[in-house]
Amino acid sequence: EVQLLESGGGLVQPGGSLRLSCAVSGFSFSSYAMNWVRQGPGKGLEWVSSISGIGGSTYYADSVKGRFTISRDNSKNMVFLQMNNLRGEDTAVYYCAKGPRIAASGNWFDPWGQGTLVTVSS
Amino acid sequence: DTVLTQSPGTLSLSPGERATLSCRASQSVSSTYLAWYQQKPGQAPRLLIYGASSRATGIPDRFSGSGSGTDFTLTISSLEPEDFAVYFCQQYGSSPYTFGQGTKLELK
């Protein structure tokens, strides 16, 4: 069974940093792209970032480019999202999700983890 | 960016009825790279449809997707009680990969 478990969320002040982690099991991790998608309180879904199976290709939404960095450790079956210079509008539940192929582009997301809440507030 | 507009915003129906949800894109979606997700309160989204019309693993055949170009439809042929939820479409043909704002399917 494929399982994804996010951690690392919490309350952080504007301008602060946070590192999210997603632990994965149940499939050949390095063969699949991984993604982060967020959902603001009472809002819709926003794609944040994607990384290829080997980690050589990464993509970001314009809203986080230059502030967030996606990475993965294939030896530990984990994917990360380093978030710097956080803003109030980054407040959301952050989900990690598996892509259907090794390439980071052109992916739907399945399955998703249960999410971790990030709150940016003073 | 490709903007996806879903309609209606809320759909009120009864079990056994047919539900038709629409997703319209601001520009043509490459290669029918369009997915549909279901989200229930407090849960993560679940993939229903990818490639505009392919059902994901384990999804009942009462769910079907159709469309191409800029107009896509999710149809639920006969609503079950567990189908009342919010539904999102997503295009993954061009970055940024955007989602529609959602259609809430509520019990009438």
Image (cartoon, coloured by chain):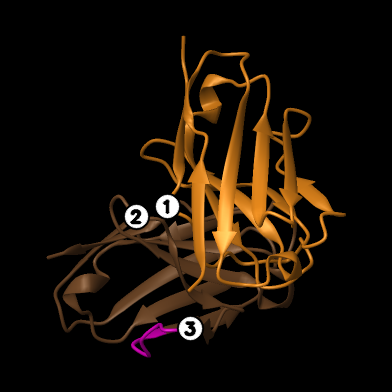
Q: Residues within 10 Å of mark 2 (few under 14, many from 20)?
A: few
Q: Chain B shown in which color? A: brown
Residue A101 image position (x, y, % from top left): 72, 72
Q: Chain A shown in which color? A: orange
Q: What residue type is labelled 3?
A: Thr
Furthest-bottom residue in view? Answer: B61
Q: Main secondary structure of the magenta part?
A: loop
- The residue beneath circle 3 is B57
Furthest-top residue in view? Answer: A122
Q: Residue B43 carries which label?
A: 2
Q: What residue type is labelled 2?
A: Gln
Residue B96 image position (x, y, % from top left): 70, 51
Q: Mark 3 lies on which chain?
A: B
| A15 left or right of A118 in image | right
Q: What element carries label 2?
A: loop
Q: A63 or B24, which is in the foreground?
A: A63
| Residue A52, picture quadrant | bottom right
- The residue beneath circle 1 is A114
Residue A112 image position (x, y, % from top left): 50, 59
The answer as to whether the residues below labels 2 and 3 share one chain is yes
Q: A100 or A77, which is in the foreground?
A: A77
Q: Which amino acid does label 1 sit on?
A: Gln
Q: Which chain carries label 1?
A: A
Q: Residues within 10 Å of mark 3 (few under 14, many from 20)?
A: few
Residue drawn at the location 61% of the way across and 72% of the way down: A27
Q: Mark 2 lies on which chain?
A: B
